[in-house]
């Protein structure tokens, strides 16, 4: 999805001061370093999670969804596989570790009883966001940030964000954001769009640090996540 680099009429992005620019450079360097350290520290649990998924699903442990990154540049976003119900047959061999998915339906709500989630372990991973941990690798490479609007598909942006898509795509997509600490899965796309716009328009190191700190208890509680 292409993205205009100019903001919509009436929306003015204030120019960052030299001090603010320095803080953002320090933030970006720090989040990439922290993400790399987390990947190293979590290497064994991540490997174990992948093995369990392979044994339960008989399919590749990782799924890559094509999402829109900053300025609309597409990238393959990694997640642990948590859906393996339905007519698809289990694979006997694994030619690769990753299955690639280009597009998904742009549903208005995220269903809490999705029939494709047939495993208690998969539901546990989704409730506590364990399936999102492989995306730390995207933060290390600079494709994602720890805080920002969640990376969406072309269809989701077109259907639910419309003219606001270009503004949301002005910044890197993030692991967490404003709507992830204010309702998560129970929110509609309209509510997520409103909060993503508020996040981008009020962008500050202090605000994003607050969101990051609020994410920790939110994830540990598993509230509003499915």
Image (cartoon, rainbow, N blue to C red):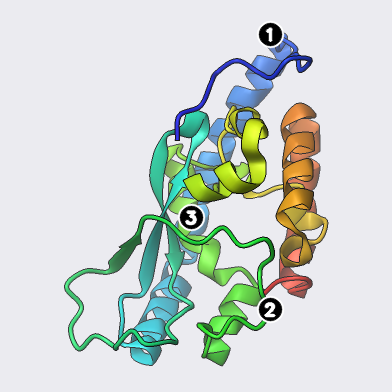
85 in relation to 176, above or below: below
Tag 3: Cα neighbours inside 10 Å, few (<14), some, or many (≥20)?
many
Contact between labelled residues 1 and 3, with CB atoms less than 8 Å apart: no
User: What kind of element bears circle 1?
Assistant: helix
Asked whether, in this view, residue 93 is left or right of residue 205, the answer is left
Where on the picture, by quarter, is residue 188? bottom right
Nearer the observer, 67 or 156: 156
Residue depth check, mark 3 versus mark 1: number of the one nearer the observer? 3
Asked whether, in this view, residue 71 is left or right of residue 23, the answer is left
Nearer the observer, 91 or 110: 110
Question: What residue is disc 3 on?
Answer: 135
Tag 1: Cα neighbours inside 10 Å, few (<14), some, or many (≥20)?
few
Report the residue at 81% width, 61% height from top. Answer: 183
* Cα gap from disc 3 to disc 1, whole angstroms: 30 Å
Question: What residue is disc 1 on?
Answer: 18
* Cα gap from disc 3 to disc 2, whole angstroms: 23 Å
Nearer the observer, 174 or 112: 112
Asked whether, in this view, residue 47 is left or right of residue 182, the answer is left
Nearer the observer, 118 or 52: 118
Q: Dividing the image into 4 quarters, which one contains the C terminus?
A: bottom right
Q: Position of residue 209 (x, y in %)?
A: 75, 41
164 in relation to 176, above or below: above
Tag 2: Cα neighbours inside 10 Å, few (<14), some, or many (≥20)?
few
Report the residue at 74% width, 36% height from top. Answer: 197
User: What kind of element bears circle 3?
Assistant: helix
182 in relation to 86, above or below: above
User: What kind of element bears circle 2?
Assistant: loop
Residue depth check, mark 1 versus mark 2: number of the one nearer the observer? 2
Q: Position of residue 177 (x, y in %)?
A: 70, 47
Question: What residue is disc 2 on?
Answer: 112
């Amino acid at each position: 999805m292409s993205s205009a680099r100019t903001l919509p009429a009436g929306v003015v992005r204030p120019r960052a001061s030299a001090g603010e620019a320095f803080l953002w450079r320090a933030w970006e360097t720090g989040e990439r370093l922290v993400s790399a350290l987390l990947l190293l520290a979590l290497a064994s649990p991540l490997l174990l999670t992948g093995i369990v998924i392979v044994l339960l699903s008989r399919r590749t442990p990782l799924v890559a969804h094509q999402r829109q990154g900053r300025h609309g540049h597409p990238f393959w976003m990694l997640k642990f596989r948590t859906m393996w119900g339905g007519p698809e047959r289990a694979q006997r061999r694994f030619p690769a570790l990753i299955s690639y998915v280009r597009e998904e339906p742009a549903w208005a709500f995220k269903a809490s009883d999705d029939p494709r989630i047939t495993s208690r372990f998969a539901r546990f991973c989704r409730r506590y966001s364990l399936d999102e941990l492989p995306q730390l690798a995207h933060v290390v490479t600079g494709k994602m940030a720890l805080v920002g609007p969640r990376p969406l598909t072309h269809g989701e942006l077109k259907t639910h964000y419309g003219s606001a898509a270009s503004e949301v795509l002005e910044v890197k997509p993030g692991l967490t954001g404003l709507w992830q600490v204010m309702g998560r899965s129970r929110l509609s796309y309209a509510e997520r769009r409103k909060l993503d716009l508020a996040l981008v328009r009020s962008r500050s190191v202090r605000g994003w640090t607050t969101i990051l700190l609020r994410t920790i208890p939110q994830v540990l509680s598993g509230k509003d996540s499915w």
